[in-house]
Amino acid sequence: MKRITGTSFYSFAKCPRLAALDLHLDRKERRPPHPWEEFVARRGREFEAVFVRDLGALEPQYPERDFAAGALATLALLQRGVPWIYQAVLRGEHRLGLPDLLRRVPGASALGDFHYEVVDVKSSGRARGDQILQVSFYSRLLAAIQQRVPEHGALVLKDGREERFLLADYAAAAANVDQQLERLLGDVAGARPFLAPACDSCHWNHRCVPELQARQDLSLVQGMSHGARAILESLGVNTVAELATFEPEGARARGNLDAVLIRKLRRAAQSMLLGKPIAEPRPRQAPLEPAAIVHLLTDPWAGRVLAFGVLSPAREDGAFAWARPASRADEWRSFLQLLTALPRAAQLLHFGEALPHWYEEQAFSREADVGTAARFVEIGRRLRSAAAYPGPVFGLPELVRHGLGRDPFRFGHGGAAAMWDGETAAEGLLAAKLRGDLLDLAALKQQLLDVADAAPAAATSSVQTS
């Protein structure tokens, strides 16, 4: 039986196509989870179990997947007014909710002089919109049972902190998503796939990505948006090949899309057909020399750095050095130890904002060298604008794949780093992944960013290598 669930709301916020496939296809057809995905899920389940353990929450008892019986068992607990209910079963017309917790709060309802509100336990460090929509969905099902809409919902985050919010602030958004899911319940084709960052971790990517590739969907083009795809298709441009030769005359012929955007999309389509990047003309920038590349691997759940790596000078033949902090308290010392072996004049190239954010947090409570932060240079934005790539570029893996033609995961997936940390082979795995990422960044810099008259590279660092 097809049902709209809390997971449907969670999925829709990521991708309507994901929600549609979840509604219509059997779970057995999903791709198996990667080991690091199951590792993250297990951490979340363990955190939830620890949090719930001391609440004294009661759980409705019913035969497995007999949700009608589960709803009756939940109603009995609601009517008894128990303080906490764990894994309640809330049912409505082709709707099913299994919230983590229901909490009794003051205020009359059909149950008595009290009512309940929804509390969901999450493994994230901050509240997200998709999580709030999920709680809003559960709250609407709960309101039908207790004949009172709870004023608040709440999320318990991974640090144990509770974030409570007014449901009324999100009622319109939740009702709109519910309406969209109702439409998808009757028509799985109502949501087309669109290549996006979330596709990498989606359990349906083995279906959607080949489908997009087979029809040369425009979402495979770097820089494409949902709106631009819709406008181009209305103009008869439906495939990558058609976009590669699309040269409209005038604003009307290009659907009033910006002329610069059309040029960029056309070049990206041409890059796809060529199978290699096409360099983009850009203003001359200060040379990235002398420089070293600094990279880090993190455990987002624990909020700590697992390893730092440095390549100096910033070339593929540079010297690699790395450090593995023993604990969060050791991170600062490990990082500074790597820096001391680098030339003081070297720029510290990095990809993304993880490194400067970490440094800012650490330096806040320490006597940090004010000049260090000024040496940081983020090269991700430069790399993205340096060329038209034969595919969308969301992060470093896509840059490596489309810019270098290399497998970005040949030394493992970055998401697996936290899983490796507890293994006996962690040293080798972390070092290999760091070195591989650094070499990829160096190759991208050399092939796409360096200019002929750049300053001579800094001398190789004297840091002990591994």
Image: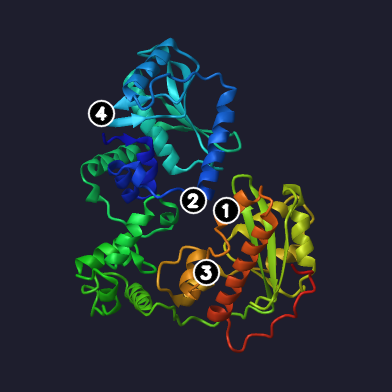
Alpha-carbon neighbours of circle 4 within 10 Å: few (<14), some, or many (≥20)?
few
Q: Which dot marks residue 34?
A: 2
Q: CA distance from mark 2 to mark 4?
A: 34 Å
Element marked by disc 2? loop
Residue matched to label 3: 381
Residue 350 in view of the camera: no
Earlier sequence position, callout 2 versus callout 3: 2
User: Which residue is disc 4 drawn over?
Assistant: 93
Q: CA distance from mark 1 to mark 3?
A: 25 Å
Classify residue 21 as left or right of residue 393.
left
Q: Could you tell me the amino acid type at mark 4?
A: Glu
Classify mark 3: residues with Cα within 10 Å, few (<14), some (14-19) or many (20+): few
Give the numbered dot on residue 416.
1
Q: Are marks 1 and 2 in contact (CB under 8 Å)?
A: yes
**In this rendering, position of residue 371 left or right of residue 353:** right
Residue 124 image offset from top left, x and y in percent: 54, 42
